[in-house]
Image (cartoon, rainbow, N blue to C red):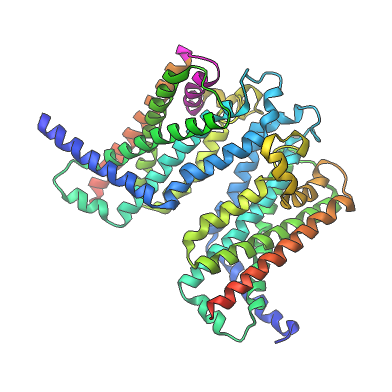
């Protein structure tokens, strides 16, 4: 089956995943509320950090919003993994594997739905953020931020999918969620690199997700540049490719 | 009378033991108590560690010493929530029905769960104190403070647990109890668990000054970073008693309601 011929299959899988938003709206609420609560809570608690000499902005809300946007994407992607684990437990995924649809098509349906679903928490967060004083990043900055957040959801979905195929149970949900939470928090989430202390300064330096956080953040705290943008896209592309490999390998192993 | 009390105490102890074993055997119940607060403590300490240089920040040896009390209270609040989820699952699976059919006081079923929560609170306090000492925190008031912190944390865990148990008894549904998890963060963010109230932004700063959970945090924090303060400790005790009294009243009301409804 060619990729051109696969689009209808991908579209149906995406539509099925998106149906859950309208049919089980309660399931989407935690994914929207959790990053918003963290955003409002952490800005209230740590807002005075901007008074530290060398802090890159006077608005902690603007500094933190990228982290919350990426957290929202992470939770949405992890939810894709949990839903897949449920489908595996209930035997529905076996029927998909038995269909003539190629494995990459099944994976594409899962991860593309995550990249669309993450727009729900992102939109809610941005509305709340702008209401409490987050700087307008400019149209270019906003487009970059949203596309990177969608990319992060793809990465999180491939991560969740790989784990769901490995463990084949919804009990693996905490690993999916905590994994994404740590990936985002072990960066320059709370403060700029030079103001981090101890081990986190080193970990943030080598954590590739730091590039994504900084690329999303640039428009909110200053001006947008290609120099600060491309490492974010490259990181997401590399992570998505690596995790897709593991997810596809997991699908192959399910049918062995 | 004494014999009945002793019999009840044995039931509470047996059910408490069962609850602790259940928590230790289920990673999904244990992880939120230890893994998440530990990870958040490590990340926030390193991420916002320079906050100690801010004007108005209390004089502390390091940010970890300041954060320890917040991590302990966060963890015991999760313990109360986890215990309530397990309690609701017991009700969903009809395990509590079998207990109600047995010749024991109905209150023992709730007290057994709360006894476990209090014990886990003491274990959590010990864990975080040891962890803090290993990674450079210091306890200003030494061994007496450690004993006091463990006792206060255990009492606070019991008090927080009563609120969770009341919600479990009222809802009979684990998903509903799980739904209060984000509220734990709201309460924590609106207290000075992670930052001094005077340096927080409004309106959180104002709310934190009157939030009873702030009193509990400060009752644990003061002997760690500065020294004993009778006013702070009395406020902490009053907050624990107040939260506990409210929780017990809600539990009693929920139990009466269940009896009326025949569940």
- The answer to whether B28 is drawn above or below residue A49 in the figure is below
Residue A251 position within the rendered picture, expressed as x and y whole percent measured from the top left: 58, 75
Residue A2 versus residue B91 in the image, above or below: below
| Closer to us: B1 or B166 | B1
Going by the image, does B4 lie left or right of B159? left
On the image, the x and y values in percent for residue A147 come to 77, 59
Q: What's the residue at 80%, 27% (across, down)?
A: A53
* Residue B226 among those drawn in magenta: yes
Left or right, residue A237 beside residue A246: right
Where does the N terminus of chain B fall, quadrant-wise?
top left
- Magenta includes B207? no
Q: Residue at x 25, y 41 (%)?
A: B256
Please give the range of residues in magenta: B212-231
Quadrant of the image occupied by residue B66: top right
| Horizontal side of residue B39 vs B177, given as left or right | right
Q: Which residue is rendered at x = 51% and y = 41% of the image?
A: B183
In the rendered image, is residue B235 in sight?
no
Which SS does the magenta portion mostly show? Answer: helix
- For the view shown, which residue lies furthest in the top direction? B230
Residue A117 rendering spot, x and y as whole percentages: 65, 62
User: Does residue A79 appear anywhere in the picture?
Assistant: yes
Image-based side of B20 in relation to A77, left or right: left
């Amino acid at each position: 089956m060619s990729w051109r011929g696969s689009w209808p299959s991908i579209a149906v899988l995406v539509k099925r995943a998106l149906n859950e938003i309208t049919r089980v709206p309660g399931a989407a609420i935690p994914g929207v509320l959790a990053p918003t609560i963290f955003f409002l809570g952490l800005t209230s608690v740590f807002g005075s950090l901007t008074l530290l000499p060398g802090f890159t902005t006077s608005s902690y809300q603007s500094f933190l919003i990228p982290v919350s946007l990426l957290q929202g994407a992470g939770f949405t992607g992890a939810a894709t993994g949990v839903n897949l684990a449920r489908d595996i437990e209930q035997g529905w995924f076996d029927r998909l594997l038995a269909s003539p649809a190629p494995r990459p098509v099944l994976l594409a349906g899962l991860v593309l739905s995550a990249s669309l679903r993450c727009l729900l928490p992102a939109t809610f967060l941005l509305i709340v953020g702008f209401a409490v004083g987050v700087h307008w990043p400019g149209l270019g900055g906003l487009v970059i931020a949203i596309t990177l957040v969608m990319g992060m959801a793809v990465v999180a979905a491939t991560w969740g999918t790989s784990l769901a195929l490995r463990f084949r149970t919804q009990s693996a949900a905490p690993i999916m969620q905590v994994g994404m939470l740590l990936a985002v928090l072990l960066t320059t989430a709370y403060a700029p690199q030079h103001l981090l202390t101890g081990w986190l300064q080193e970990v943030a330096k080598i954590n590739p997700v730091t590039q994504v956080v900084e690329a999303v953040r640039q428009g909110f705290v200053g001006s947008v540049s290609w120099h600060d943008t491309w490492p974010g896209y490259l990181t997401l592309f590399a992570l998505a490719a690596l995790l897709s490999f593991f997810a596809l390998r997991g699908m192959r192993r399910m049918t062995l | 009378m004494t014999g009945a009390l002793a019999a009840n105490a044995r039931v509470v102890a047996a059910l408490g033991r069962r609850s602790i074993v259940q928590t230790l055997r289920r990673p999904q119940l244990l992880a939120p108590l230890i893994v998440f607060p530990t990870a958040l403590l490590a990340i926030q300490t390193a991420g916002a560690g320079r906050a100690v240089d801010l004007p108005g920040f209390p004089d502390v040896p390091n940010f970890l010493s300041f954060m320890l009390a917040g991590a302990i209270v966060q963890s015991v609040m999760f313990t109360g929530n986890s215990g309530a989820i397990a309690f609701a699952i017991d009700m969903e699976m009809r395990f509590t029905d079998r207990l109600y059919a047995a010749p024991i006081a109905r209150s023992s079923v709730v007290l057994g769960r709360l006894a476990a929560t209090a014990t886990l609170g003491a274990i959590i306090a010990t864990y975080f104190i040891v962890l803090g000492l290993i990674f450079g925190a210091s306890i200003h008031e030494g061994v007496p403070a450690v004993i006091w912190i463990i006792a206060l944390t255990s009492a606070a865990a019991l008090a927080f647990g009563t609120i969770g148990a009341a919600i479990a008894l009222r809802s009979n549904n684990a998903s509903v109890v799980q739904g209060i998890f984000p509220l734990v963060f709201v309460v924590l963010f609106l207290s000075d668990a992670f930052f001094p109230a005077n340096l927080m932004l409004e309106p959180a700063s104002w709310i934190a000054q009157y939030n009873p959970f702030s009193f509990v945090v400060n009752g644990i924090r003061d002997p760690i970073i500065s020294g004993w303060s009778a006013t702070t400790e009395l406020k902490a005790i009053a907050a624990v008693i107040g939260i506990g009294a409210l929780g017990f009243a809600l539990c009693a009301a929920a139990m009466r309601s269940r009896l009326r409804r025949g569940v």
